[in-house]
Image: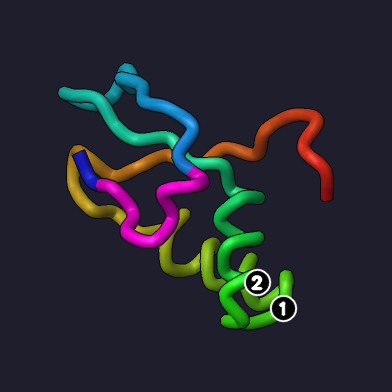
Amino acid sequence: MVLLEGYEDALIGFTTPPDRDGRVAVYDYTKIAEIIVNNGEGTLSDAMDYIDYNISNAWMGEGTPLLVDVCGAEE
């Protein structure tokens, strides 16, 4: 299982996807973006670009975490 260092506050749970052999971590996309912005690492747009390119589209093996956009989350 791959855990995203620095984004512990965005971790919302674990699941076993049907196409994987084991459990994976599940993170809240919006909370990761907020962490990036709050750390002064860019604007919300920058954060979303970073997440989309470096996390959402990255394959880290069977333990690659999932990102979800939580319904009802404030934008």
Determine if the magenta segment contains residue 38.
Answer: no
Pointer 2: what residue?
Answer: 37
- Amino acid type at mark 1: Thr
The secondary structure type at the circle numbered 1 is loop
Q: Quadrant of residue 52?
A: bottom right
Name the residue at 55% across, 56% down: 32
Which region shows up in magenta?
3-10
Along the polypeptide, which appears first: circle 2 or circle 1?
Answer: 2
What secondary structure is the stretch in magenta mostly built from?
loop
Disc 2: CA contacts within 10 A as few (<14), some (14-19) or many (>=20): some
Measure the C-alpha gap from mark 2 to mark 1. 6 Å
Name the residue at 42% across, 27% down: 13
Pointer 1: what residue?
Answer: 43
Horizontal side of 41 relative to 12 (left or right) equals: right
State which mark lies toward you, 2 or 1. Answer: 2
Image coordinates of residue 67 in percent, x first then y, are 50, 42
Res. 49 visible in picture: no
Horizontal side of 57 relative to 74 (left or right) equals: left
Disc 1: CA contacts within 10 A as few (<14), some (14-19) or many (>=20): some
Image coordinates of residue 34 in percent, x first then y, are 65, 60
- Amino acid type at mark 2: Val
The quadrant of the image that shows the N terminus is top left
Q: Are marks 2 and 1 in contact (CB under 8 Å)?
A: yes
